[in-house]
Image (cartoon, rainbow, N blue to C red):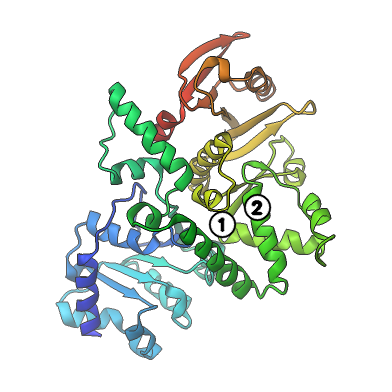
Amino acid sequence: MDKYFIDKKEDIGRQKVVRRLIDVKPSKDFVNAVIGPRRAGKTFFLYDIINRLKLKDEDFLFINFEDDEIKNMLRREVVKCIQKHTELYGKEPSYLFFDEIQNLDKWQSFVYSLVEKKRYFIFITGSSSKLLSREVATMLRGRSLNVTVFPFSFKEYLLIKDFKIKKVFSSIEEGKIKNHLKTYLKAGGFPQVVLEKIDKKTFFREYLNVVLYRDLIERYKIESPEVARLLIYSVIQSFAKEYSINKIYKQLKQKIEVSNKTLYQYSSYFEDVLFSFLLRKFSFSYKKSLLSTPKIYINDNGITSSFGFSENKGRLMENLVFLELKKLELNNIVEIFYWKDYQQHEVDFVVKEGMRIKQLIQVTHASSREDIEKRETNALLRAGRELRCKNLIVITWDYEDKEKIENKTIRFIPLWKWLLRI
């Protein structure tokens, strides 16, 4: 095991690691469970933590339970890893990083015993095909804190492109930002797509197959793989739109034998593995909200491009805004919904903080005031009156201003500015 420790740290030291703009507050009272969509960069996020904390070799223990050296060891040898590390470095490690922890037999009892000692800062990751965030919380008896890692945000994307983020930009710099945003809007932020010269269509088709077969079919023992495949394509096609399982059921039952219950079940699996997310319609009644027809969004815009559903820039912008708001929701900062009244006036996002409605947001691919349809602002004003919210925002492509309508102030903000502020 000594050789493994040394080789692993040398390997980590050789890696080119991108600094992530994800806050982490290590605690000896809890395990930091790093979760996120497949291939979002969870392992490299652990490397990032090591770098940002400037940990020396003797300060941390890192084990990837998918490495052959570890797989071939007996469990009783692996659980002595801290003792072995202390013998090698003459110091007990303060930080423990366990990557792909689900490969260790009875891992939860091992990790829980370490948490109980309150002597270590512990980080674990698990494959979404084997380990979900809700399972971590259950298995560790409430002693875990989730850290969610998504593909690169636009702010991270700009930093990777060596673009300095500041408060004020020149006209030339703004032009460059919008050029980067055009690329990011379609290609998305998966690390392999952003950092490597890779064929995007090949990457996303292979990615979708892995999600389908490993995260869904293998994990949940799905009996109708063809139904799962058709449903996942339906999700991609429907992104940033209302998503009715009943409508999909009516379409599919003519081609393939399937039940409504199965479709609902499979759809929930997509959310479990963080592939797609449902956004409920806002209502002061929790039951009405839960039973409403949701809208659906996916974990990265690049997926839509590879399957030819990326021509509608307004929907791509909306999906991008959703993902940033979803990160806030997963960190328990806000709750998000959409709003729609009986006359079909719609507001893309209702941002709720505690018991109050903090903000209402519309998203539109507009470059001038004339491009913004009256129905967009009318819906915003109606929702503002009904929900008693004065913070009204329209996120545009390239239009910025403030406007007073019916004694309400609406702010128009370009997408790039909003993404850099949030």
Residue 305's x, y, as percent?
A: 53, 48
Which residue does the image show at 34% across and 46% down from the upper left?
A: 21
Disc 2 marks a residue whose amino acid type is Val
Residue 112: % across, % down: 43, 73
Residue 169 visible within the image: no
The correct choice, above or below, for 288 with respect to 300 in the image is above
Contact, CB < 8 Å: mark 1 with mark 2?
yes
Q: Which residue is mark 1?
A: 275
- Residue 77, numbered label: none
Q: Residue at x 56, y 28 (%)?
A: 364
- Say left or right for 38 vs 55: right
Which x, y percent locates residue 7? 21, 77
As drawn, the residue found furthest toward the left would be 90
First reached walking from the N terminus: tag 1 or tag 2: 2
Q: Quadrant of the C terminus?
A: top left
Name the secondary structure under disc 2: helix
In the displayed structure, 41 sits above or below 337; it is below
**What is the C-alpha distance between the residues marked 1 and 2?**
10 Å
Q: Amino acid at mark 1?
A: Phe
Q: Is residue 422 above or below residue 308?
A: above
Nearer to the camera, 413 or 30: 413
How many neighbours does mark 2 have within 10 angstroms: few (below 14), some (14-19), or many (20 or more)?
many
- Read off the residue under disc 2: 235
**Percent position (x, y) of residue 73?**
36, 89
Residue 61, quarter of the rendered image: bottom left
Decide if residue 366 is on the left or right side of residue 110: right
Badge 1 crowding class, 10 Å Cα cut-off, few under 14, some 14 to 19, many 20 or more, is many
Q: How many marks?
A: 2
Residue situated in front as seen by the camera: 201 or 407: 201
Rendering quarter of residue 103:
bottom left
Looking at the image, residue 104 lies above or below residue 117: below
Of residues 101 and 208, the one drawn nearer to the viewer in this rendering: 208
